[in-house]
Image: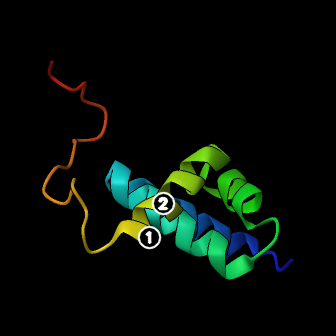
Amino acid sequence: MVMYAPEVERKMKAFYDSLSEKDRRRYAAVEAAKLGYGGNEYVARVVGCHPDTIRQGSEDIEKLPEDEAADRVRKKGRPQES
């Protein structure tokens, strides 16, 4: 499996952190897919998420463009209202 240079990993993490929760999942899933076998675990380590988050992102991408949550974006660090 290809591993990125430390500078690329740093930029990936910075970009990942700038995204909404939904977009973070999807970005991580696309990066992992490019790497193939072992990509989920590697990208999860680089961006600091759980591999299950990447699997959910892959499922999200498979549902495009019929995304039920397309207009719903939570703000980072704020709890959902009940």
Is residue 21 placed above or below 10 in the rendered structure? above
x, y percent for residue 12: 56, 68
Farthest-out residue, right: 1
Q: Nearer the viewer, residue 56 or 41?
A: 56
Residue at image location 22% in from the left, 41% down from the top: 75
Q: Nearer the viewer, residue 9 or 30?
A: 30
In the image, what residue type sits under mark 2? Glu
Residue at image location 71% in from the left, 52% down from the top: 45
Disc 2: which residue: 59
Is residue 40 placed above or below 1 in the rendered structure? above
Q: Quadrant of residue 39?
A: bottom right
x, y percent for residue 23: 36, 61
Q: Nearer the viewer, residue 12 or 57?
A: 57
x, y percent for residue 10: 61, 65
In the image, what residue type sits under mark 1? Glu
Q: With 2 as the anchor, is 34 left or right in this view? A: left
Disc 1: which residue: 62
Q: With 5 as the anchor, is 17 left or right in this view? A: left
